[in-house]
Amino acid sequence: MQRDLIDAVARARRGDLQATEAVVRHALTLALRTSAAALGSRELAADVAQEVVIDVLRDLRKLRDPSRLDAWVHRITARRAMRYLHAQRSRIASDLDSLGEHERPATHLNESDLTAQWSATPALRAALAELPPRQRVALALKYVAGLTDSEIAAALDCPRGTADLLLSRGRAALQANPLLADLRPSRLQGEA
């Protein structure tokens, strides 16, 4: 984490409004990016991100180690996004149907391209919407927020093995989903 941001946290705790604004902008950016990927909707992500910022502002004095701000924000975002997924499952499905219907689908799906394609196609958004909330949030933390598996475990408040399992099952479900058939690499010639 940048030294400037660590200093901003300390100054924000003392009531410095400019430092507080910097911390809020940083937290909002992290929360928006992760929640948009997890929820599949910019509008819902904005709601979650606003709630995350309120939590950050309210509890900033409770953050023991300012260098852990990002991890703390990811953890709050993961919890809020999962609550939203549980509460708004049907609303998210209808939002996914209306988003990006005219976007051109990607030609293949692999781990390195998943970040760029995260919400690039209606089929991928629909497939993500079918995943259980924890798998969906774990994938968002991995491929959008760029967290390590250990950081994902901390954000989800679970053991590392559980985070690995959530990621593995989420990727397997996406690979097996018939909605994503057009995104899979074509078979090599000569294979049966």
Image: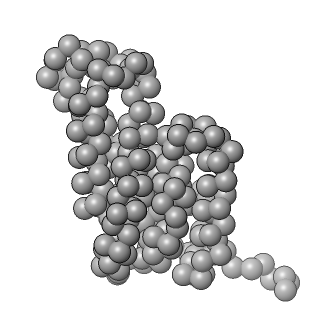
Report x, y in % for residue 133. Answer: 48, 60
Q: Is residue 14 above or below residue 68?
A: above
Q: Is residue 183 visible?
A: yes
Res. 146 visible in picture? no
Q: Where does the image place residue 140, in percent across and percent down from the top left?
A: 48, 54
| Quarter of the figure that contains the C terminus | bottom right
Tell me: 106 left or right of 27. Answer: right
How did the renderer colour the structure?
Answer: one colour
Instruction: Between residue 18 and residue 104, name the one nearer to us.
Output: 18
Tell me where residue 46 sits by quadrant. bottom left
Residue shown at the point (49%, 40%) measured from the top left? 155
Left or right: where 10 falls relative to 79: left
Count of number-bearing discs: 0
The structure residue drawn at horizontal position 45% and vertical position 33%, both measured from the top left corner, is 71
Q: Residue furthest left?
A: 17
Which image quarter is the N terminus in? Answer: top left
* Residue 67: quarter of image: top left
Tell me where residue 101 appears, x and y as whole percent: 35, 81
Foreground residue among 81 and 69: 81
Instruction: Answer above or below: position of 27 versus 10.
Output: below
Residue under the image location 53 percent in, 40 percent down: 157
Viewer-side residue, 84 vs 94: 84
Counting from the top left corner in percent of width and height, residue 61 is at: 29, 20
Residue at 43% across / 47% down in the picture? Answer: 78
